[in-house]
Image (cartoon, rainbow, N blue to C red):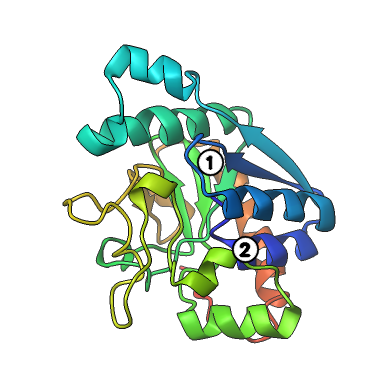
Amino acid sequence: SMGDEVLVHLASDELPGLDVVFIDTGYHFAETIGTRDAYAATRPITLINITPIQTIPEQAAAHGEDLYARDPNLCCALRKVEPLNRSLEGYHGWISGMRREDAPTRTDINLIEYDAKRDKVKLNPLAEWTATDVDAYAAEHGVLLNPLRDAGYASIGCEPCTRPVAEGEDPRAGRWAGSNKTECGLHTFAIYLDHPGHCAVQAFQDAWNTGLEHVAHIQAGANGHGHFVQD
C-alpha cells in the first residue's frame, strides 16, 4: 500500500530495477495510488500492480456488500493475501518493511525469516529501525512520502479500514479500529531462523545465502540509520 516508502527508496538504490509488488485492493486512498504512480515514474523499480481475482462488485455479489465491515479477515484474505501469494510465484524470496516497533504482534520479527506458508525467504531489513530512524533517513535522502503521513496516518492500509492515529497511540491503532483484528494476514506463519540449518527445505540454503548478501548491500546503503542484526 506504499506504506513502506523508505524501504522502496533504499532497496531500489541498492538493487536498481527490482520488482516492487503493489497489491491494488480496490479500496486504496487516492493518495496511495498517487504515491504508487510517482514511485513508478521516478525510482529505478519495476512496478508490478496485482489485483484480486474478483472486482469489488463481483465480491459484493458473492459475499454481500461491505465485506470489510462484516468479515475483515475474509476481505483481507481475498483482496490482499491471495493476490500476494499469486504475485510471489516464481520468486525465491521477498522483502517487507516490517519493523519491531510497529505493533506488539511484530516485536519478535527477525532480519531474515523463512516464510513457511509460501516456502520462501523473507527479509525484514528495517526490523530494528525506530520511527526516528525512518524519519531521519527520509529527511536526509528526500524520500517521497505518502501525503497521508502529514494527516496523521502512521500506518496506511485500505481507506475503509484505516484512520489517523492520535499522539501516543500505537502506530497501527488506526488499522481496523474498534475490532480485535491487528494483522491482514500477509505476514503470518513465518519461522524465525538462527541459521539456515533450521529450515526443513534443503533448497532453502542457496536462497538463504543470497538473502544474506542482499541484506548486507541494503545495510551498507543505510548510511548509519537503524541497526541491523544478522542471526
Q: Residue at x 77, y 64 (%)?
A: 14
133 or 156, which is in the foreground?
A: 156
65 or 176, which is in the foreground?
A: 65
Task: Say whether residue 77 is visible.
Answer: yes
As measured in the structure, the alpha-carbon distance from the residue carrying label 1 to the one carrying label 2 is 29 Å
Residue at numbered disc 1: 204
Q: Residue at x 50, y 19 (%)?
A: 53
Number of dots carrying numbers? 2
Residue at numbered disc 2: 5
149 or 193, which is in the foreground?
A: 149
Mark 2: few/some/many CA within 10 Å (<14, 14-19, 20+): many
Helix, strand or loop at mark 2? helix
What x and y, as percent, mark residue 145?
63, 68
Q: Residue at x 50, y 29 (%)?
A: 83
What x and y, as percent, mark residue 188?
34, 45
Q: Residue at x 22, y 33 (%)?
A: 71
What x and y, as percent, mark residue 136?
61, 86
Q: Is residue 125 left or right of residue 107?
A: right
Q: Amino acid at mark 1?
A: Phe
124 or 120, which is in the foreground?
A: 124
Mark 1: few/some/many CA within 10 Å (<14, 14-19, 20+): some
Judge whether 83 appears above or below 157 on screen. above
Q: Earlier along the polypeptide chain: callout 1 or callout 2?
A: 2
What x and y, as percent, mark residue 219?
65, 73
Q: Amino acid at mark 2?
A: Glu
Helix, strand or loop at mark 1? helix
